[in-house]
Image: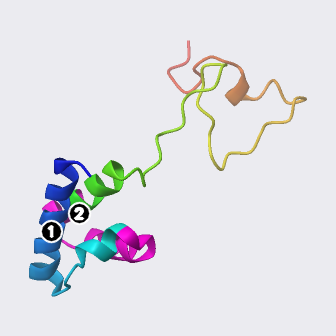
């Protein structure tokens, strides 16, 4: 465990005790993932910006935040929740490849 992670956890431990009255068990935090995630969720619900930031930092340091999805080979990142346009509707404004919402000439 690196020094930065331990410092971040110490900040979370102190802030959780001050803000929420919750005592963080350090040993259990590193051995019980469910316990750790519950405490980090509790920390992120706080109004204290430093506590929320520290919780996000430690999630990142422990590898619990996934890296963003890299663009595909075509050069565009995949869009989540968007439906695919059928191939037969190539004349729709979304597929023309030009800007259509500006001033008209």
Residue 83 in the image, given as x and y percentages of width and height: 74, 45
| Labelled disc at residue 78 | none
Which quadrant of the structure image shows residue 39? bottom left
Decide which of 72, 60 is in the foreground and name it. 60
CA separation in Å, label 1 and label 2: 6 Å
Q: Are marks 1 and 2 in contact (CB under 8 Å)?
A: yes
Residue at x 28% of width, y 73% of height:
27
Residue 84 in the image, given as x and y percentages of width and height: 77, 39
Decide which of 54, 85 is in the foreground and name it. 54
Q: Which residue is under mark 1? A: 48
Name the quadrant of the C terminus: top right
Q: Is residue 38 magenta?
A: yes
Q: Vertically, is 60 above or below 26?
A: above
Residue range in magenta is 31-53
Residue 24 in the image, given as x and y percentages of width and height: 22, 78
Decide which of 61, 47 is in the foreground and name it. 61
Q: Secondary structure at mark 1?
A: loop
Residue at x 66% of width, y 20% of height:
73
Q: Which residue is under mark 2? A: 52
Residue at x 65% of width, y 50% of height:
81
Q: Is residue 69 magenta?
A: no
The answer to whether 102 appears left or right of 22 in the picture is right
Residue 95 in the image, given as x and y percentages of width and height: 72, 25
Q: Vertically, is 61 above or below 27?
A: above
The answer to whether 42 appears left or right of 87 in the picture is left
Q: How is the image coloured?
A: rainbow
Q: Secondary structure at mark 2?
A: helix
């Amino acid at each position: 465990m690196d020094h930065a992670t331990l410092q971040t956890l110490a900040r979370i431990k102190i802030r959780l005790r001050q803000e929420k009255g919750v005592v963080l068990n350090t040993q259990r935090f590193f051995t019980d993932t469910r316990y750790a995630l519950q405490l980090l969720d509790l920390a992120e619900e706080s109004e204290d910006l430093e506590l929320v930031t520290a919780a996000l930092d430690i999630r990142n340091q422990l590898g619990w935040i996934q890296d963003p999805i890299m663009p595909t080979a075509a050069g565009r990142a995949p869009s989540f929740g968007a439906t695919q346009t059928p191939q037969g509707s190539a004349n729709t404004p979304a597929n023309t490849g030009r800007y259509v919402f500006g001033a008209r000439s």
